[in-house]
Every structure is written in structure tokens, then in C-alpha cells.
Image (tube, grey):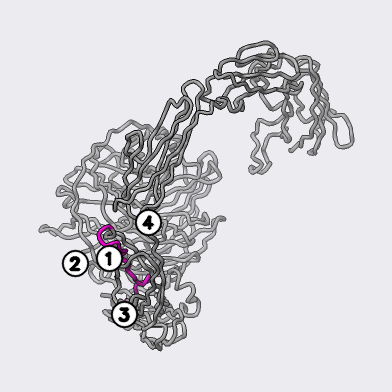
Amino acid sequence: MFRNFTCYRCIFTLILTITFIFLGQSQDAFHRTYKSDNGRDIVVLAGTQTKAGNYLMACVEEFKNSLDTINTDTLIISAFNPKGNVLWSRRFALKDQRLNAKYGKASLYGDSKDSLYYFSFVSTVNDESYKTTGSFLNRNGSLDTLIFQKINAGSIGSRKYQNLNVNQVYNNSSFNIYNSGNAAYVQRQAYDRNVDWSKKLSLSLPEFGALSSLQMTQDTNLLLTGYNTQAFLTEMDTLGNALMSMTYKTNTSALIPIGADKYQDTMYRLAGNYDESIFFLTTDTSSTAINGTLYSIPGDTLQLLDMVKDISGDHVYLGKWHNSTDKKLYHFVLKFNADGTLAYKKYFDRIEGSRTEIASLIASVDGGIVIFASQIEGSNVIPAIIKLDPVGKSLCEKDMPDLVSTIIQVSESKVNLQTENYQPIYASFSNHEKVYSFDVPTLSVETKTFCSNEPINWLFDANVSGLTMEPKYLWDNTVTTDTLRVMDTEKHTIMVTIDEKVCFILCDTVKLELYPEPQVAINESYADYCEDEKVKLTAFLTDGLPPAKSFKWSTGETTSTISVPFGTYSVTVTDGCDLSTTKSISIADPRLKSVKIDTSKISDCVKGASATLTASGETNLSPLSFIWNTGETSSTIKVEDIENEAIYVVTVTDRCNNTAVANVTIINDRSQIIKNLDGSYVDTSLICQKILGLNVLADPGSNVYSYIWSTGSINPNINISEEGIYTVTVTDICGFSLSKSFEITSNQLLEYLKYPNVFFPNGVGTVTDTVGINTRNRAFGPANTFKCPINITDYEMIIVNRWGQEVYTSNRIEDEWDGMFKSEPAPPDTYIYAVRYRFNGLPVSIKGDVTLIR
């Protein structure tokens, strides 16, 4: 149950600033906590947002054993809608040997289809470490798989982040890091849980230390941070190869990173903790530290827990603030603009943060931030979700005191990251699960559907019970009671502000509905027609509500179903609102009266005609039976080898023994087999030998008898070296012929050089990168790879400026213009070029313009 706490400032500010249109669509900001259904402590491990906009959170349930030691044996996965209301929650019992487990930060992420979500965390029992991974369906929280991966422990390094497990999703797989015992590991795992590769890491340091974070860069590399006596930063590619490894240290305390980012392709930012302060470190393109800054509140302790980029690309950091004045812990967030200035610094004092170092920070799809963290209410640790809007509002936040910044000197060293392949060991587990319930208030306003012919008078009741303090109610028409009397079908919105330990809002949009005007439909059934020659008609209201009150057929019958011979009938149906509607139906004679045969035919002058014949009949008295004059009894038959013509007859019978007959005559018309020669083409593969190939192919399956070209060749293809018109005649085995002509011009016997339309004598250099031109394009000349340059003779290139001055000439194809004119760099401009040469003795002329950019 929530405790008393005053939040009038939140309420009045919210009423003035939030519109009801906004409230009807989604909850932009809130701070909500969720109590256990059995009084145990619930610790947050991870959270995420689904593509549908809902939130998912993974927690563990803690209890104390007989030795008063904190243990866990239960994993809880919960889903929340965008307003923070619980959609579903599931409790999963961990494997027996996972009892008394120690755990760390976990991961929760989804696949590309928003249908399957995955969780992963590391636990240690009796000095043995296991990575637990599982997947569940987002629709209802049903667990799909649960797998344990035994992790071999190392022998060196810090155990600070021993049980950490962090994932990054990429291309239908995930990268994850974890620490086991004294060793660190990085692994790529597909969504089907198969491991693509797994590496054990070591650095050329006296002690390697433990990994603390994993981020993915814009160029899809991996950034790993960690520390022992020094902070280290490592970049790897997606195959597990180390690209860069650096360590950073000060002359006093250790830098303990919680995350890193790569920007401008080769520069890095690190963030983390330093004694009782937080630090931010920027490097240059050689990974050298150039700007180290500490932020602190004198006398207090600040600690970062997580970091994320929002959808605008700005960095947001989540941490804990130990206030020395009131001796309490509060969660806080810092957001930095792109230029490094603070956009906002907020903390949440309505409920104290727990001492756990586990929390999750994600960027929401609407531009805000979502915090999943453990907080304290009374003597219990409970999960909390804090949703911030894009400017850091959460309904109950406050501005932090000014932070004191201090420059620190940081030195760096390049180190060699060594990796060795590691084979994980798996064990699957048949889990035990049951529904889990959080003790949270909900809002549910009852509505009603009225008849269109009755007066509307209804009392909406939005009372939220079970709270220690009366909430505040506000309807869209400014009514502030928990009830609202309405006499219309307009949409109304209610906002209920809960003001206890935390401030959040329950919102609902309600509307009275009118039953639609009744619409009647009639179903036909011919199941008993063979016995009584009657059709069964059933009338019903298409919407179903309100239910039908009475039926009146044109036959005088008053039941919903009647049996009648074919003819025309009508029915009037009256619904529960005493509104009536009428519908008529005409029933045709359902007996089989005619049959048709669909035919697909192929004629062959050698084998004869063949055909596929399909018979069908018009009737409602199926199934039908078939008998052909060939003796076959299927609806479709195949006939072959018809030399001249043949007649086929089918007799069709419906299930009431009514029959009809049809026939079809199949004639072998011995038509031409070859229909076209569109498969012909020109082959230029021998152009360097002054030869073109002409090829012709008849229809696939055609039985070609002979080819004859105008050159006298009898092959399907010929080679030529002169322009002109070439004709081929193809004859099939039945004696039918088809001809096709090729007109070859001199242009088809040529190969053309291609030239770029821009070049950079100084390289891209200071030119904006968005130009997108490779820095090798420093001189102007032919851009394409020529098949046979030896066939080019009499080459000449002339380049002039816009005033007609000749700035460059060349008679060698290998020479290119370097952008110089009279021993000086030619100015940036557009220049005209003309190229002439002979290919296989034939003249070629090319003209164009090129832009010089410096």
C-alpha cells in the first residue's frame, strides 16, 4: 500500500500543462512503484521497450535463509502499457541448483518482429557460475525456452562485476559480455540461442580486471570497458577481433567506467565513477586522453549506474546520489547536449533508492527516457519505473544542486588484447512458472451501450479504491469528483492523480455507445434437400447485440429457422430495442442442370494433340460424381496422342442423383511449334578481336530442325566483324519456319572510354565528407577499366576552361590531368574536355565537362 506524501505542486502544474488529447493517447511521464504480492523484496535486473510501445522488466525475488543470508530462486518478467499499468506478470522458478544464487546486472531485449523477447543474467552458486538465458512470447509472457550455460572460471583479476551480463542486439543476433570468477568473456549468440563465437579475454597487464559495459558503435563495432587498477577501453569487430585497446589512469584513485561511446569515427567518450565523484573522459583520434572532468557535490557521493543515447543522439546518464544531509539515496539523471553542456540534472526524492548497483536506462520511442530501478518503500525493496519526457519531466522530479566540475589529468597506455576461443557448456531446463501479481492501483470506468430510441442517462464512476490518501480527479469538462453524469455519447477523459510516495497519473477515455440499427442476414442450408426437397433458411442479426426479440416470415412462421421449397421469401426481425428490419431472399432450383468442360490443349505434329479436361457443374447439391466415356471418374482427366480428332463425354451427378451431360471435341491442328525467336542476343565478348557474336535460340521445348544464316552458316550462332544486316531462318521438325534479322551498326563494334564528372587534386581533405568521393580521385582521366586498350590508337585529349583557354593536352591514354595550369593550381571550376581516338580502326569522339574541387 502506498504511504502518505503531498504532491500538490505536481497536480496543479500537470492540470495546467497537459492536454486531454495527449492523455488519451499515451502517458508521457510518470513515476510508479510496484509492490510484491507476498511481501518479499523485488530487485530490478533490466528493462526494455517493445516496438509496440509497451515496457518489459526483469526482476528477481529475494528472501533470507535460515542463516539470515539474502538469496533468490525466482525470476519475474512483467509487461506494462505506455501508462505504466501492468499488462501481465510471470514468475519463473529457477533450477534447484540456482538456489542461494548471487546475481548482477542482466539484459532484456527483443527480436526484429516484436514477438519474441530474451533475457540473460549470470548467477554464482558455491563458486560455480552459470549464465541463464531464456526467451518468452511478448503477447502473454509465455516462457519459450530456459537454458543454463556453465561458465569456466578464470584465475586472475577483480571480482567487482563478477555476475554482470550485458547484451547488444545486431543483425538477428546479440553480443554479450560477462565475467565468471576472475575471467572476462565476450560472445556472439544468434536468436536461436546458438553461439557463433565465444572469446576469453586477457590484456598484457599484471591483472586484467572485469568487464563493466558493452556498447555498439555507429559503424557496428563493439566497445568494451572495464577496470581493475586501471580503466581500459577495447574496440572489437563483429567477428571478435580486437581493433584497439587502451588503459587510462590517474595518479590517485582508479577510474571505474560504466560505459563508452565512439564519435567522429575515431574519438571516444568514457563515463564512470571516481571516488565519490563521476567522471567523463574524451580522447582524440589516437585514443589519447584530452579532456578529463570530474563532477561532484561537496560532502556527498555520486555514482553512475548506466548510460544511453536518446533518439536525438544526446547522452543521458543514470546514477545514485547519497545525500549527506538527510542520509538518503536518490536516483538521478543527467542529460548532456551535443556540445557537452548539461541539458538537465534531475533527481527523484519521493521514494528512496535502494543500495543495489543494478539499474537499467533506455531511450523511449517518443524521445524520452525510461528508468527501471529498485527503490525502497518502508522495509521493502520494490521495482519502480520512471518515465521522463524529452525535457526530463517525470511529474515528481526536482533539479539537482549545481555540480562542481574539476579537471583531472589522465594518462593512457596502449595494450595488447589477447583472445582465445572458448567453448560454452549448455544445459536446458523444464521451468516452472505461474502468474505473478503486483499490488498496484488501476482505473477501470464502466460503460454501457444504449438503444438508439431510449434516453441517455449514465453515471461514470472513476473511483480508485485501496489508497491511503484520496486521489485527485479531473474530467475533461473540469468536474473534479470521481463520478460524472452524462446524457450524450460524446467521448470523455478522466485523469486520476495518485499522490502518495510517488506521483503518477491513471488516465482513461470513456464513451457511451449506441446499438447499431438492426441488420438481418439469412443463411441457406441444403443438408436435407434430398429427403424433402426443401431449403433450410436461418435469419439472424449481423451485429448480434442487442439480441433478436422476434421473427416474422412471409410464410407466417415466427421461428428463426424455416424449411421451404425454392422460391422468394422475406423475414422481419425485431431486436431488443424494439427496432425492426426486413430482408428478402430468392432461392433458385438447386438441382444440377448443366455441365461445362474447361480445356487446355497442346498440338504436336509428331506425337499428336494432348489436352487437360476439367468438368464442373452448377449446383448447391455437392459433392458431385463424374464418369467419362474413357471410364475415368475424376473431375479432371488428361488425354494424349490424338492424331486427328476425338470426342470426350462426361456425365455429372449431384448428391440427389440429378444428372447432366457435356462433351468436347479435341482436334490436332498441327500448328507451328516455334512461336518466336526473342531469345536472340548480341555477344560482345570477342570485341577485342574485332568480332561480334550473333546467337539465336528458339522457344524452350521447341523441336528445332535447322538454322540457316544469310552468311550461309548453319549454326545457332555466328561471328561477324562488319556492319550490315544479318538474317537467320529457323525451321522446326514439322517444317514450319521463322526468320529474324539483325542490323549491326559501327557503334556496336566500338568500345567507349568513360570519364568522371568531378575530381579532387588535393584529395577530399577539407571538403565536407558528404561529397562521398574517394580520396584517390585526385587526377582526371579515363574512369573505366578498358577491355582492350591495345586496340586504341591516335588517342588525344584536350581540356579548356570556360574562356576557351587550353589548360591541358595529352596523346597518351595513361596520362591524366593533375589540376595544374602553367605550373600553378588551376582554380576550382567546370572545364570542358574533348577526347578522340580510334578503336579497331574506327573513329570515336567523346565530349563532356568535369568539375575541379579543391
| In this view, the mark in front (2 or 1) | 2
Check if mark 4's residue and mark 2's residue have beta carbons within 8 Å. Answer: no
Q: Tell me the residue at 36%/44% (across/down).
A: 227
Q: Residues within 10 Å of mark 1 (few under 14, many from 20)?
A: many
Q: Mark 4 or 3, which is nearer the eye?
A: 3
Q: Which residues are magenta?
A: 530-547
Give the amino acid type for the residue marked by disc 2 in the picture: Asn
Q: Vertically, is 761 above or below 276?
A: above
Q: Amino acid at mark 4?
A: Thr
The answer to whether residue 164 is above or below residue 185 is below
| Three-letter code, disc 1 | Ile
Q: Name the foreground residue: 688 vs 98.
A: 688
| Crowdedness near tag 4: few (<14), some (14–19) or many (≥20) residues, C-alpha within 10 Å | many
| Residue behind mark 1 | 382
Instruction: Work out which quarter of the rendered image holds the N terminus and state it.
Output: bottom left
Is 534 within the magenta? yes
516 to 629, vertically: above or below: below
Q: Residue furthest left?
A: 66
